[in-house]
Amino acid sequence: MAFQLHPRLAKGCHALGKLGICRVLLKDNALFPWFILVPETEDDITEFHHLSEEDASDVMRSVRRISHFIDDHYRPDKINIGMLGNQVPQLHVHVIGRFESDPAWPAGVWSCAEKQPYAAARVAQVSRLIQPWLDVTDNPDDAGGLEF
């Protein structure tokens, strides 16, 4: 069966492209630089340890690359990485830039009731900036920080 993105992820995110075996999504909450990586695997793989060694390594390389992108373009105080699956069973990884000034600090982003959808122009800007990072043969230069 062909890979299908969980409906909740499809509804709450903007698709940015692929990195390795992962789809790269931007969570539709402009309060945080929040990216979600979804490995394109069989539906029955819902846990990281169920991935093959090769696929697990690919996912971790992708997490590192997106973390570098967040660090270079947003300059956060901290980067949070999490693999939760309590509400969306499809295997996915959250990579989130955090700031001491963000509305959820120091708690987790899930506890923050405040949300701000992305404007279309801002999604286009993030998409344009991340594209060189999605090509693993590229070594993008620091193009400057994104306002956050």
Image (spheres, helix red, strand yellow):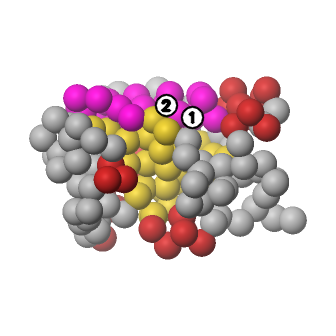
Query: Compared with residue 80, is residue 41 higher up or lower down, i.e. above or below?
Result: below
Query: Compared with residue 13, is residue 135 higher up or lower down, i.e. above or below?
Result: above
Q: Is residue 122 visible?
A: no
Q: In which quarter of the image is residue 74?
A: top left
Q: Where is residue 97 in the image (x, y as percent from the top left)?
A: 31, 39
What's the magenta bit mostly, secondary-structure-wise?
helix
Query: Compared with residue 33, is residue 62 higher up or lower down, i.e. above or below?
Result: above
Crowd class of label 2 (few under 14; some 14 to 19; many from 20; radius 10 Å): some
Left or right, 121 with respect to 131, comes to left
Secondary structure beneath label 2: helix
Secondary structure beneath label 1: helix
- Position of the N terminus, as image quadrant, is bottom right
**Distance in Å between CA atoms under marks 1 and 2:** 5 Å
Q: Position of residue 134 (x, y in %)?
A: 52, 42
At 60% from the left and 29% from the top, the residue drawn is 60
- Which amino acid lies under the numbered mark 1 shown in the image of this protein? Ser
Q: Where is residue 115 in the image (x, y as percent from the top left)?
A: 26, 64
Judge by depth and name the residue closer to the eye, 95 or 148.
95
Q: Quadrant of residue 90?
A: bottom right
Q: Are marks 1 and 2 in contact (CB under 8 Å)?
A: yes
Q: Where is residue 114 in the image (x, y as percent from the top left)?
A: 22, 63
- Which amino acid lies under the numbered mark 2 shown in the image of this protein? Arg
Q: Does the magenta stretch include residue 28?
A: no
- Toward the right, the furthest residue is 1
Crowd class of label 1 (few under 14; some 14 to 19; many from 20; radius 10 Å): many
Q: What count of labels does the image hold?
A: 2
Residue at mark 1: 62
Q: Which residue range is magenta in the image?
A: 59-80
Residue at mark 2: 65
At 50% from the left and 49% from the top, the residue drawn is 36
